Image (cartoon, rainbow, N blue to C red):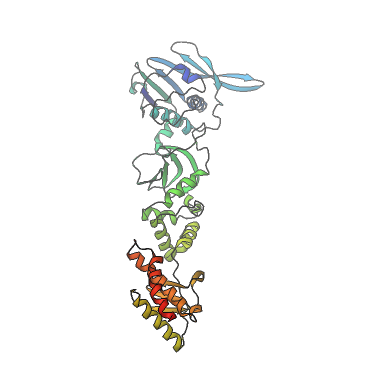
Amino acid sequence: MIVFENGGEIDIAAMTTFGVSVKIGDSPIGFFGTGLKYAIAVLLRTGCRIMVFSGEQEMRFSTRRGNIRGKDFEFVEMAVGDGVPAPIGFTTELGKNWQPWMAYRELYCNTRDEGGEVYMAASASAATDPRRDFTQIRVEGAEIESVHRSHDEYFISGEPDLTIKDVAIYRRPSSALFYRGVRVLTLPKRAVFTYNLTGHVELTEDRTMAHPFMAQYYLRRALAKCDDPDILEAALTASSDDFERDFDYTSDGDRPSDAFLSTAGRLADVASGSLVPSALNVWNATRPRTFRPQVTPLTAAQVDTVARVRQRAQRAGLDRRPIVVADAIPDGAPGIVVDGTLYIAARLLGDEAAILRSVLYQQSQSAADDDPSREPIDFLLDALTVELGAVAA
């Protein structure tokens, strides 16, 4: 026998009237006012016995066969105290697609929402005695007892290993997605981790996720912001049999965490074949690109020109920096600094003033990095005033 009990006395109308929900918890799971009726119908359909005590008043549920337009139905009836069973307006076909665990979930959530407890009792005598200001539901049957023994398949227990963006992550695999600790979706594949959504999620009337396609969105968004390398490595190397393998990290637009990118980069170097394809795409799109210039051979005259430019840059008060001429600079820029070396475009070689502008601009940017109060362009103008005049002379 499974016993569900909590403080307060349930109103008989709440068990027989659709659309009545008066939960007192801060964040009740159910609010449609239909779940208890569904649970009663499902339990009776699967051969369970169900009794409800509202205070000391007992209500027993049973079925009576009836026929409507040539089709047989099992009509649900309720007897109050010593009264005669009477129809309460629905049949055992209510919740036709519900499974026994969903009926258990409904009763468990109702009890949890009201701050009560659920336990297994060997017999009626082992259960708490009915009393005033107290509600107790007793259910007997192999189906409900089997679900109770598999409680962890339907409800989250224990503290999460990590919580990110309204997603609690547990380091254990699962084929279920949970919401506020309650199973709301069966995933198309087993997931590497167990996930519990803690933010707002829209549910259907049977307490399942209204928009299942949102599951991947919530989970991949959380993983993209994760800072735990171990969790990231497990998620980003998910196999084709795992739910996380199909996550599309390129579709959300937000930059992933540094830990996500560094983990993806490391895995791309050592095990790119096992990396989730979209994570590899994200890494390739965001990883640093190092310019590898093709150095241009210089004539003696050109070497002298570059040397004069270096001397004038030093007279302008700039630090010494190696200057190399390259065949091409990315994006058509006149110059670029790579690993402490200034590369200038070969196309500038015929214009000493243009070379000097490139040198001064690139080096003035570095000087401004050391002194954020000074804009690079201001520094450049100061230097050009002196050095370009010298070139013209």
Q: Position of residue 256 (x, y in %)?
A: 43, 54
Q: Position of residue 133 (x, y in %)?
A: 35, 17
In the shown orientation, is residue 344 left or right of residue 131? Answer: right
Looking at the rendered image, the quarter that the N terminus falls into is top left
For image coordinates 37% across by 76% down, the residue present is 313
Q: In front: 217, or 53?
A: 217
For image coordinates 50% across by 33% down, the residue present is 99
Residue at the outermost top position: 83
Q: In front: 137, or 115?
A: 115
Instruction: For residue 23, say whether it is visible.
Output: yes
Residue 163, placed above or below residue 381: above
Choose top left, top right, bottom left or bottom right for residue 257.
bottom left
Looking at the rendered image, the quarter that the C terminus falls into is bottom left
Q: In front: 237, or 316?
A: 316
Residue 61, placed above or below residue 242: above
In the shown orientation, is residue 93 left or right of residue 257? Answer: right
State the count of labels. 0
Instruction: For residue 1, say whether it is visible.
Output: no
Q: Position of residue 234 (x, y in %)?
A: 41, 54
Residue at the outermost right position: 69
Q: In front: 76, or 32?
A: 32
Q: Position of residue 301 (x, y in %)?
A: 45, 88
Residue 165, placed above or below residue 235: above
